[in-house]
Image (cartoon, rainbow, N blue to C red):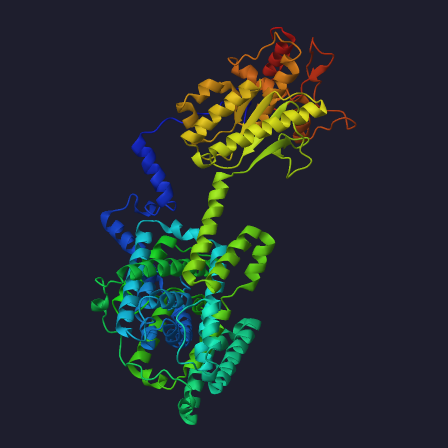
Amino acid sequence: MGNADYECPRRVSIPPSKPFFNSLKSGLKETLFPDDPFRQFKNQSASRKLLLGLQYFVPILEWAPRYTFEFFKSDLLAGITIASLAVPQGISYANLANLPPILGLYSSFVPPLVYAMMGSSKDLAVGTVAVGSLLISSMLGKEVNPNENPKLYVQLALTATFFAGVFQASLGFLRLGFVVDFLSHATIVGFMGGAATVVCLQQLKGILGLVRFTHATDLQSVMRSVFSQTNQWRWESGVLGCCFLLFLLLTRYFSKKKATFFWINAMAPLTSVILGSVLVYFTDAERHGVQVIGQLKKGLNPPSLSELDFGSPYLMTAVKTGVIIGVIALAEGIAVGRSFAMFKNYHIDGNKEMVAFGMMNIAGSCTSCYLTAGPFSRSAVNFNAGCKTAVSNIVMATAVMITLLFLTPLFHYTPLVVLSSIIIAAMLGLIDYEAVIHLWKLDKFDFIVCMSAYIGVVFGSVEIGLVIAVTISLLRVLLSVARPRTFVLGNIPNSLTYRSIDQYPVAKSVPGVLILHIDAPIYFANASYLRERISRWIYEEEEKLKISGETGLQYVILDMSSVGSIDTSGISMFEEIKKVVDRRGLKLLLANPRSEVIKKLNNSKFIEHIGQEWIYLTVAEAVAACNFMLHTCKSNPEVEYNSQDDNLLFAVLILSQVTTEARFIRMMMGVKGRGGNPRPTPSPPTGKDPDEDTYITAPAALPSSSLVSNYWMQKVLAGLQGRKP
């Protein structure tokens, strides 16, 4: 790169204005289509575009032609493994939702088939989820008693599932996946932990063999219901439940100790169901107070479109429940899918996942299925079993279909206490103690969000906990926008770098210059705060310099490199800051304003007001200009800065910080300074400042890629001495 690239100063460019509709189109594209899904359709024939469109919405059409028999062997093993987990979990979670147990099996048949065709994750195993089941039970149970009016309750559950699917699919089609991002990691950890605790407490009904139990989910109500019925406790159920729970926890422990034994944990729930059923059958435990599932309907899913009740007086309850369970299911499913995709180094499309989740819940609500998602426990088993594609979901659905057609009578004697043990064992895995400890060490505010969600769920309700967590998370976002960080920059010795003096104690402040960094976009929400904060920085700096007796403050530089956008309130804030600076006899400079910012400042005429010569590409250039004015113009009032001579300006900016820039250039050239070997370059030209008893020495002779050519060096020196080059 030759001298020509550097001899002229680089002005801050003002981007050309675009038509309004072009700007709007560009903004919407960046917001809604950051991954540019339409790029694959460019320059393609109509038939090719149709095929690509079908592959986009139905991904199985893309990877099915490349499917191999080796993949099928892996998917077959994984599918059979997760089917052994899906059957007992489906029955258990349906029982948790106060729905007929058969609906849990139905929900593991149709939705996995839909997801296998439309989902983008290779590892996600679809099925019912504990938290969604709990939400359905708690929210719908407040309006309709499932024991007194079971048909209406089932209709509301199916209707809520339909609206959950519509909401999920709408988010995906409208590219509004960022809505789910408002559920932060800390929120999810706290909410899931609280929900898992509540679910475990609810299972005391099955463990103790209680017939009547509260539908409330808060800790106080559950404990009151448990201890007010001590005379109804069944020791037979308690012993049986504790034994199976211990068995399930031990199998999980051994599976974690050695990954090759993952199948032990996967088979444990089904093994518990079989052992429990055999034990009840041969010991006649049903007569001794051990409750069983009873008769399960044989056959495939019956259509349930007519069961969707859109004219019910409880319709708004179903809609509200659907939206909430839809968001929770999306947050859990997408997080699980992305986690496993990261391990296998592939990418899943969040918007595709939303469409797939939505369509499988819409289809499920029409085929007697309630809410399904991608539960972590089932997906982890699928991953560890070595699945290769979503065909494992098809295998699982096939196994469930066989169960529905031929094996449902075998579950008649399955004790409810075993189902409670399966649920408790699964829920204990959702309480992530390590994540909570990590949050405490890393970010106290996130820890507060997490614990607020947990406490809200456990001591209030699932809805209250969710509202508290989301509110605190949004409050944090609002605070970060309304109260952005501002800090003072200083120069790192022997460099042209400027960093926060709080983060880098070695950074030195520049005499007579206050450099402030604004670390956020400037909007109406923070404009007033920034005006007050910058004014306070100026006041504090002046007071500090007055006390220390150092050079008085002359210049204020605002580093705009982190200000991505600005609105009219922000522009008004700059105008007010300019007035504050002018009243104090100071000069305001801007460094590195972004494209959107400089365009709006120019349109508002603020650039003309401040003078474009006081806007610089970097903080280093702005400081160099300030130093030149401080050290040269101060001693000779007749010497004025000529903003029209751009080339002289740039050369002055480079040479005004001789003590810093010369060392930096020598370091980059490998030229040793004082005490080192003699410089291999010719003696540099020198000039004497007539007003000061000091010499200004140019850096050693520079190579062809130097910042300033020899001609401009001579011109600078001549300008400083008041003669022509």
Q: Percent position (x, y) of residue 649?
A: 56, 17
Q: Is residue 635 visible?
A: yes
Quarter of the view holding residue 140: bottom left
The quadrant of the rendering that contains the C terminus is: top right
The quadrant of the rendering that contains the N terminus is: top right
In the image, taking residue 190 as reference, residue 157 lies left or right, namely left
Q: Nearer the viewer, residue 477 or 262?
A: 477
Position of residue 505 relative to residue 397, above or below, is above
Quarter of the view holding residue 269: bottom left
In the image, taking residue 42 as reference, residue 685 lies left or right, namely right
In the image, taking residue 270 as reference, residue 554 lies left or right, namely right
Identify the residue shown where x is 51% and y is 25%.
577
> In the displayed image of the protein, which residue is found farthest to the right?
675
Q: Tell how many labels.
A: 0
Identify the residue shown where x is 35% and y is 49%.
176
Quarter of the view holding residue 416: bottom left
Q: Is residue 12 visible?
A: no
Q: Percent position (x, y) of residue 296?
A: 31, 81
Q: Nearer the viewer, residue 482 or 565?
A: 482
Q: Percent position (x, y) of residue 452?
A: 50, 57
> In the displayed image of the protein, which residue is found farthest to the front?
228
Identify the residue shown where x is 61% and y is 16%.
629
Q: Percent position (x, y) of residue 601?
A: 43, 25
Q: Nearer the viewer, residue 139 or 418?
A: 139
